[in-house]
Image: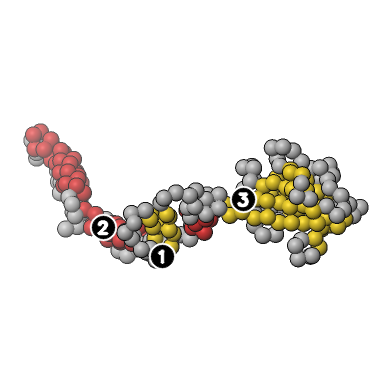
Amino acid sequence: MPFTKMNEFKNLIAKLPDVPNGTMTSAELKKYWDSSPEELRAHYNKLVDELQASTASMNIGAAEIEGLDGSNLQEILTSLKAFIDAHKNDKKNPHGVTAAQLDVYTKQELAPFLQGGETFIKEEVFIITSSNNGDGTFTYTDKNQISHNGTLTDEGYQIFTLLEGKYKVGENRIDAYIDDVLRRSVASGGLAEISPTEVALTIPEGTGREITFKYFGRIGIAGEHNLVVGPDKPPVGDGKTVWFKVD
């Protein structure tokens, strides 16, 4: 039921007859005078009751909202709830939020660390063919005899770039061996970690020296339990396999 509309007061001063004194008693005049405020009070209270009713929202008009249906408050609210419920139940990342935005690891980044018992170790061997090219670089070859130019820092450090993997900086996961005899590391000196794929000899070596870098790209933890990540369920029965299903 729509709200009740009040059109006009029943008793207006303007409706009193234009006759000389004495056609109404004082009591009648007071009652007539008070009738309009009383009408207003009664109408106001009725409107309050109508607004407090459970159906009130159906009688409050609303402007059209793009993406929602309805022309009154109740219809708009019902449409809004349906929109929110559908959005909440959408498990396909409707906003396209990325792992980088949330500052979290991706599945690909986590997978290597969930593979128990597997340690990734690399050794890369380089031969210095020119210890100083005179332009802030030096030259070295890899195991395939391919030549590479490395950077010389202002301090004279020789920066090599790893070709087959990377290591985690700041965790002492890389060592250098000079001609398979002299060892260099951050802890013992002679080595500086530059980036996950770059490492520097802080004690420069000369032409003809063989430099072997040995580094841990991943350190697995061996144990009696096995962690499996993937869409396919592994065989069960040993009670030692934990499976992370990937949809």
Disc 1 target residue: 231
Residue 177: mark in rendering? none
Q: Secondary structure at mark 2?
A: helix
The percent coordinates of residue 5 (x first, y second) are 20, 54
Residue 74: mark in rendering? 2
Disc 1 crowd rating (10 Å Cα; few below 14, some 14-19, many 20+) is few
What residue lies at 40% left-to-right and 57% top-to-bottom?
244
Disc 3 crowd rating (10 Å Cα; few below 14, some 14-19, many 20+) is some
Identity of the amino acid at label 3? Phe
Q: Quadrant of residue 36?
A: top left
Identity of the amino acid at label 1? Pro
Closer to the chain start, of discs 2 and 3, is 2
Disc 3 target residue: 216
Residue closest to the far right: 134
The percent coordinates of residue 46 (x first, y second) are 16, 47
Separation of residues labelled 3 and 1 (CA atoms): 28 Å
The percent coordinates of residue 172 (x first, y second) are 64, 42
